[in-house]
Amino acid sequence: MKSIPHHLFGEWDGAAACSTADWANAAKQTIADMHRIGTMPILVGGTGLYMRTLLDGISPIPAIDPDIRAEIRAMEQSAARQALETEDPEAAGRLAPADTTRTARALEVMRSTGKPMWQWHGKHEGGIGDKIQLHPLVLVPEREALYNRCDARFEWMLDNGAVEEAEALAARNLNPELPVMRAIGVREIIGWLKGEVSRDEMIARGQMSTRQYAKRQYTWFRNQPPDWWHRAQPENFDLNAHFELIFQN
């Protein structure tokens, strides 16, 4: 990070709920700015939904009524899930019962627009995938090694500012449903700071959350991108040779 400029990293304050569309719009502007000065942007990350929104566009769902959003976000997951099964059974059928974020999203879309999610999904707008030259590479590490790195990473975070960051967030008394308050490790560390769990339990929970997220990323990137997206194991993989071959072709 010290040798390569990073963009859209730490751009939003935690009190602002940055949507996928917000990020995609900012990314499109940043990419255009870099192209104008002759710089090649490299998209790096593991959040497939954001990448897909940037490349393929997003369904033009109208803004959600704030009162409806507040009401749904205040619901217990069991109640929200039950309501979704009644009001949008299609969404309930494809979403995991414990998926609080997508359950709330599907329910608020249904109540705010009067249409279920599936009626919006077929219409995408604003993607840049057909306007750029894309040279994708999906790194698919060996699972056990990946999970070991996840565990080590969480402990490294604790020793390099994560505790202080969580403490600062807790002091702001932000809405617990904001994305920043639901980020991996935040709830676990705050629970430990409050004396609700031991340090060992906090670490175990944070590591488990990290592994679960990595598992979802792993599955998405193995199965969702098009077949022509090159997939490779990161160990002993020559990035220079890979991209030299692409540009020669």
Image (spheres, rainbow, N blue to C red):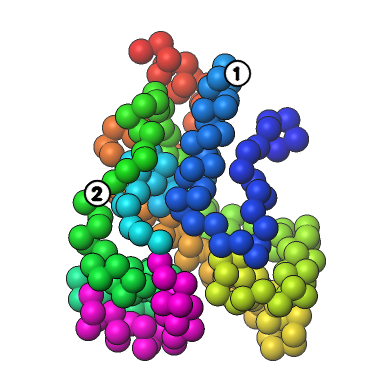
Amino acid under disc 2? Lys
Which residue shows up at 73% across the image and 30% down it? 3
* Quadrant showing the C terminus: top left
Above or below, 60 against 86 in this view is: above
Residue 79 place in picture, x, y as percent: 36, 88
Of the pair 109 and 3, the residue shown nearer to us: 109
Which residue shows up at 70% across the image and 63% down it? 155
Residue 103 place in picture, x, y as percent: 36, 73
Above or below, 147 against 163 in this view is: above
Q: Is 30 displayed left or right of 160 in the figure?
A: left
Which residue shows up at 29% across the image and 67% down it? 113
* Quadrant showing the N terminus: top right
- The label shown at residue 123 is 2
- Which residue bears the numbered disc 1? 37
Badge 1 marks a residue whose secondary structure is loop
Tell me the crowding category of disc 1: few under 14, some 14 to 19, or many 20 or more residues within 10 angstroms, Cα based.
few
Of the pair 247 and 118, the residue shown nearer to us: 118
Residue 232 place in picture, x, y as percent: 41, 36
Badge 2 marks a residue whose secondary structure is loop
